[in-house]
Amino acid sequence: MKKDAVDDILEQWSEERPELDTASLGVVIRVMSLYRAFVRQATGALEPLGLELFEYDVLSALRRQGKPYALPATRLAGATGLSSGAMTNRVDRLEERGFVRRRPDRKDRRGVVVLLTASGRRAIDKAIQLRLDAADESLRSINSKERKELAALLRKVRLAGEEHQ
């Protein structure tokens, strides 16, 4: 199998500190490197639509809800891992672009519901296809079975990490 830059790092550690088991570090460094590459890839995939990755995240969270494509702002913030302040700024930008609108929350007079507009729905429906195409391209070196196995392993690691938070 062909070596990568991480192999070089691990070999250097093995030479300097042969008693260390660096296998875990090899996985973590590769995942961190892939994260940066995947963010660049996702950003590039959305460029033709003029969408930022954060805009995609918000629109995607709303679109996945099904009709009426709406969430209270607090739940939308939770779905995207944002603070309420950050969510307010993002919704402001999306509202300016005509992708979302706000309405008072009928269940909580203090709250706001964010709704996906028809324009926002068209944008996210195009964006998800671009993201899927880019993701497929990124994983072209592994087959469908390997993708499922990798997803299962990464899920296992992620869930174990969540248990320790």
Image (cartoon, helix red, strand yellow):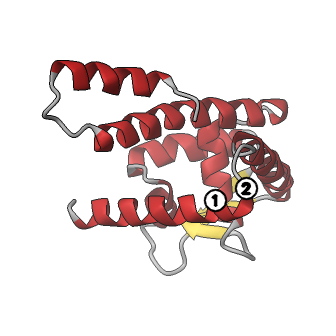
- Tell me the number on the disc at residue 143: 2
Q: Quadrant of residue 160?
A: bottom left
33 is higher (above) or lower (below) than 99? above
Q: Are the residues tagged 1 and 2 within 8 Å (C-beta)? A: yes
Where is residue 8? Give x, y as percent: 40, 20
Q: Quadrant of the C terminus?
A: bottom left
Residue beneath label 1, please? 146
**97 vs 60, nearest the viewer:** 60
Q: Quadrant of residue 30?
A: top left
Q: Secondary structure at mark 1?
A: helix
**75 vs 35, nearest the viewer:** 35
Q: Quadrant of residue 50?
A: top right
Q: Label 2 crowding class (10 Å Cα cut-off): few <14, some 14-19, many 20+?
A: few
Which residue is depicted at the point 75% across and 44% down?
A: 140
Q: Is residue 35 visible?
A: yes
State the separation of the CA atoms marked 1 and 2. Answer: 5 Å
Where is residue 152? Give x, y as percent: 51, 66
Left or right: where 114 falls relative to 153: right
83 is higher (above) or lower (below) than 97? below
Kind of residue at badge 2: Asn
Q: Quadrant of the N terminus?
A: top right
Which residue is depicted at the point 32% across and 27% down?
A: 10
Left or right: where 147 falls relative to 26: right
102 is higher (above) or lower (below) than 41? below
Q: Label 1 crowding class (10 Å Cα cut-off): few <14, some 14-19, many 20+?
A: few
Which residue is depicted at the point 43% across and 53% down?
A: 81
Where is residue 74? Give x, y as percent: 44, 63
Left or right: where 21 falls relative to 91: left
Where is residue 127? Give x, y as percent: 79, 47
